[in-house]
Image (cartoon, helix red, strand yellow):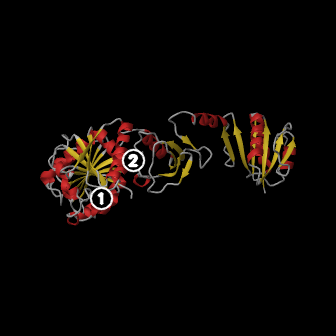
Amino acid sequence: MKKILIISDGTIGQHFIQRVADTYTSENIYYVVELKANTYDNINPSRFKFFEFDSTSFHKLANLLKMEFLQVIVAMDNQSDIEITIKNIRNVKKQLRVIVLNQWNMENEDPNVVLVNSNEILASRLLDYLPNVPVIAQNVGVGEGEIMEVLVPFGSSFVYRHIGVIEQKNWRIVAIYRNRKLIIPTRRTMIYPNDLLLLVGEPPVLKSVYRAIKRELGQFPEPFGSNILLFIDMNIDKPENIKKLVRRALYIHTKLKHELVIKVVNPSNIEILEFIKDYRSLDVIVDIDYESVNLKENLFIDIKTYHIGLLVISKDMFADFYIRKALYEAHVPVLKLAHKDFSTLKDTVLILSENRDIEKISSTIFDISEQMNFNIELYNYLAEHQSEKEQVIEHFYNLSAIFSKSIKVFKEDENPIKLLQEKENFIQMLPFTSKLTGRRIASLFSTDSEKLYHKLDDYHQIFIPVQL
């Protein structure tokens, strides 16, 4: 049994002793010193030993300290009495750990004396009752905010996202409380409105995560990352197209209001490089790699270094089988720019497929469409799997109400890809699954609209990763 010494003189000390008696009496033996004896309920005589004397008396306290105590807890109402008591303890036990209730902003340089500031505890506890303020664990870890609870609101950018597609650098979602039940999340776990998330991480990072969860639409590319990366390979991208790529990326940058990184590999055209360098600014970074690089390795390093949440590349790069596989493995949304104007786009187009992957990326679709001021159009091919598609449509209608953004649903007997090939001023959004990493020739006889994404290759497309 571990021996704990409690020195009490005042109301707080009495409350503490009663709480110990009610709750934490199974493993320890408590020796209680009080100036005047008090009466307590639920006292187990085998666990509590009471003494009535003044702890400022060195002789009496020293006699008690002949026993080996694990630690001492001091809760007294007089500062000078506390200081004398600590001095008495130190004269007998040089290394004994002493926990002191500090009501006067006392200071102590002894590493084995822990001062618990009562004003900070009360203020922190009251703070927990304020709305829209994160609840921080005060008595776990170092108590500086490395453990936090956050309630997910309906309009959060985290709603309907899988844990696996949320970048968690220096922080983690370790538990979810839903309907008063604990869920230990996996990468496949989806976050729903009113979920209570338990977060663990570096306190400054958790503060940023809290703000991101509480904010509504307008946060993309968060939570995938913070910034936008335009990736240009001069061995693939033609000089006459690169300037257009840069201008379109800059336009997207102004809409999404996140830092833009322009990365150039295999540089070969000095005039184009000078053109790109002219756009350097506080929120536009130009990174030119003059050495031969492994594209996949280089891409992953850039995503981590610049905290990238959206990759922008040309249709020519996305057409490359090996690059497309690397992009899929990066688990970051990819905007494939076609050879069309971007600023004239009006609509986000979604083609409902035989699975419900598009439902998993729905909140991201709404977020991008809101920021870019796009209308949302769903195309439902009536040939098959109507029950699944109707559930997806209902889901989008629910989100439409939550985000106050209208949608249009088109039910077509004809293949929507053929209809869209005659339409202008739209961008297609679709889930970025492993199906898109195959060679295009393998999809020639497929009826899966996602595998046939390249049929709309002449249009801008955004591929959003899905955790399977």
Marks 1 and 2, how far apart in space?
18 Å
> The C terminus lies in which quarter of the figure?
bottom left
Neighbourhood count class around disc 1 (C-alpha, 10 Å): few under 14, some 14–19, many 20 upward: many
Circle 2 sits in a helix, a strand or a loop, which is it?
A: loop
Q: Residue 228 carries which label?
A: none
Q: Residue 55 at x, y = what percent? A: 82, 41
Q: Residue at x 66, y 44 (%)?
A: 109
Work out which residue is located at the far left of the displayed protein and give it: 240
* Quadrant of res 128: top right
Res. 2 in view: yes
Q: Nearer the viewer, residue 64 or 421?
A: 421
Instruction: Give the answer, above or below, for where 393 lies relative to 322.
Output: above
> The N terminus lies in which quarter of the figure?
bottom right
Q: Residue at x 26, y 62 (%)?
A: 323
Type of the residue with mark 1: Leu
Q: Which of 34 and 18 is in front in this view?
A: 18
Q: Residue 223 carries which label?
A: 2
Circle 1 sits in a helix, a strand or a loop, which is it?
A: helix
Q: Residue 117 at x, y = what percent? A: 65, 38
Q: Is residue 61 left or right of residue 453?
A: right
Q: Residue 218 at x, y = what percent? A: 35, 39
Q: Name the residue under label 1.
A: 327
Res. 306 in view: no
Type of the residue with mark 2: Pro
Is tag 1's residue or tag 2's residue first in the polypeptide sequence?
2
